[in-house]
Amino acid sequence: MLKTRMKRQAAKIGRAVDRLAAIEASVAALADEDLLDLADIFAAGEPTPLREMAAAEMLHRNLSL
């Protein structure tokens, strides 16, 4: 029973890691204007992981709002 639960948890974590990698790749694949639009949408309010990803990619590309 414990092995099954551990396998299920490992599979769940693996899917989450894959989804996160896909999101990061999608943000990196955005054109400059689209990246700026995304960053502008998340600029107000509390920091979110998506906002941080957009900001990191903007820094990498030397872009600013």
Image (cartoon, rainbow, N blue to C red):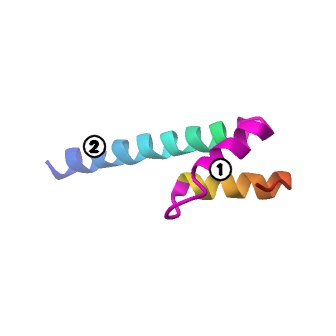
Q: Amino acid at mark 1?
A: Asp
Label total for image: 2
Q: Which residue shows up at 73% across the image and 52% down it?
A: 57
Q: Which residue ends up furthest to the right in the rendered image?
A: 62
Q: Residues within 10 Å of mark 2 (few under 14, many from 20)?
A: few
Q: Which residue shows up at 21% across the image and 44% down it?
A: 4
Q: Which residues are magenta?
A: 28-49
* Residue 47 x/y as whole percent: 53, 63
Please give left or right for residue 2 compared with residue 10 in the image.
left
Q: Amino acid at mark 2?
A: Arg
Numbered circle sitting on residue 8: 2
Circles 2, 1 touching at the beta carbon (< 8 Å): no
Q: Which residue shows up at 53% across the image and 56% down it?
A: 49
Would you name the residue on which mark 1 appears? 40
Marked residue nearer the N-terminal end (2 or 1): 2
* Disc 2 from disc 1: Cα separation: 38 Å
* Residue 40 x/y as whole percent: 65, 50
25 magenta-colored: no
Please give left or right for residue 54 compared with residue 11 in the image.
right
**Callout 2: helix, strand or loop?**
helix
Q: Which residue shows up at 13% across the image and 47% down it?
A: 1
* Residue 65 x/y as whole percent: 76, 55
The residue mark sitting in front, 2 or 1, is 1
Q: Residues within 10 Å of mark 1 (few under 14, many from 20)?
A: some
36 magenta-colored: yes
